[in-house]
Image (tube, helix red, strand yellow):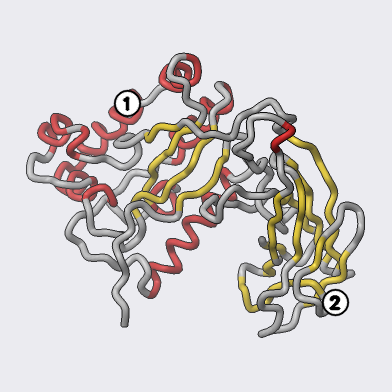
Amino acid sequence: AEAEDCSAEASKHGTETAKEGVGPAESPTRVAAGPAERPARSLGRSPKKRKLRREEFQIVISKSWVRRVYPGDGHGRVMLRPDIPSVAASEVGKGHDCNWIIEGFPGDIFRITFDPSSMIVSSAFVENRLNGTQSARWRGVNLGCWLVLEKWMAPEFFAGLAPTAEDELALMMQGGSKARTAVKQFRDSFIRLEDFEWLASTGGINAVRLPVGFWCLEEHARGTPFLPTCEYVDLAFDWAEANGLQILLELHGAVGSQNAEHHSGCSGCGIAWLEGSNRRQNLQVLEAWAIRWGHRKAFLGLGLGNEVAKPKLI
């Protein structure tokens, strides 16, 4: 959760597992004090099977855990009840394991508000988006090769541009301007609205996993051979929402590579995604994605890394 030095509002939700991603709200006057609004899901198929869930959180000021905001009554974990304010504290080096707790049923949406002038945190119930009508059993597919090119899935495409290239980075470097034009044309047609329509209406699918490289946004693609893909992610969310699907946005290609495999965008380039500036850049990438898409109705979460190699222990 994050908050700047102004009144901050965002929603809080229960989560099915710790792997689900979250993202802050996007408005400069309503800075996020919690993840973007999206419902928690239950494996139950009827309201009778719903169980109360709990989610713990703190608030971060100026994007630094050094300036964390935590319950100020000194009792560690504090239940944040709707419409009952809670006093906050913020001292450098303190607050570890002192969390607020939100309790609700799967699908419940809460709005968390932090006022830094009074150091008060409060919550309000917004709605339940499930209303006992939706199943939380995700039936999903992976939309591979669209936004992170993989040679084994499109061998003819690679052969026509750079036959010796084994990954997207090599393809873009060897293929030059021809490859840039071809890649754009490929992405314009590889996945379309009608694919999302078919998945929802005929395929029995209610969620898609969307592999994306760190170069998705223009500011992160700048200075690299990669082409930004954010316009296609925008379309994917439009299409998903029009068809009642959810999207898990997956960091498939991290800065420094998480596995040195072709599907990370760069094969044989070493595994350095957690080292030095690469680690910071990857966190910045995930934060930027959460800000841009975390508020979308179809946002299911963030995948923090695909097929991550075992880190070396020092």
Q: Secondary structure at mark 2?
A: loop
Residue at which label 2 appears: 73
Q: Nearer the viewer, residue 155 or 184?
A: 155
- Disc 1 crowd rating (10 Å Cα; few below 14, some 14-19, many 20+) is few
Residue 229 picture location, percent across and down: 40, 40
Q: Is residue 271 left or right of residue 4?
A: left
In the rendered image, the residue lying farthest to the front is 48
Q: Residue at x 55, y 56 (%)?
A: 18
Give residue 251's position: percent from left, percent from top: 41, 51
Outermost top residue: 202
Instruction: Measuring from the top left, give residue 282's x and y in whole percent.
Output: 43, 61
How packed is label 2: few (under 14 Cα within 10 Å), some, or many (20 or more)?
few
Residue 46 vs residue 161, the one in the foreground? 46
Three-letter amino acid code at the position of disc 1:
Phe
Give the answer, above or below, for where 159 lies relative to 78.
above
The quadrant of the picture occupied by the C terminus is bottom left
Does 276 sit left or right of 54 as displayed? Answer: left
User: What residue is disc 1 on?
Assistant: 190
Residue 261, image x, y percentages: 22, 54
Report whether residue 221 is seen. Answer: no
* Element assignment for label 1: helix
Reply above or below: 184 against 269: above
Instruction: Calculate the distance from the C-alpha at mark 2 to the C-alpha at mark 1.
Output: 55 Å
Dividing the picture into quarters, in which one does residue 65 lie?
bottom right
> Amino acid under label 2?
Asp
Q: Which residue does the image show at 63% across and 35% down from the upper left?
A: 44
The residue lying furthest to the bottom in this view is: 93
- Quarter that holds the N terminus: bottom right
Quadrant in the rendering for residue 56: bottom right
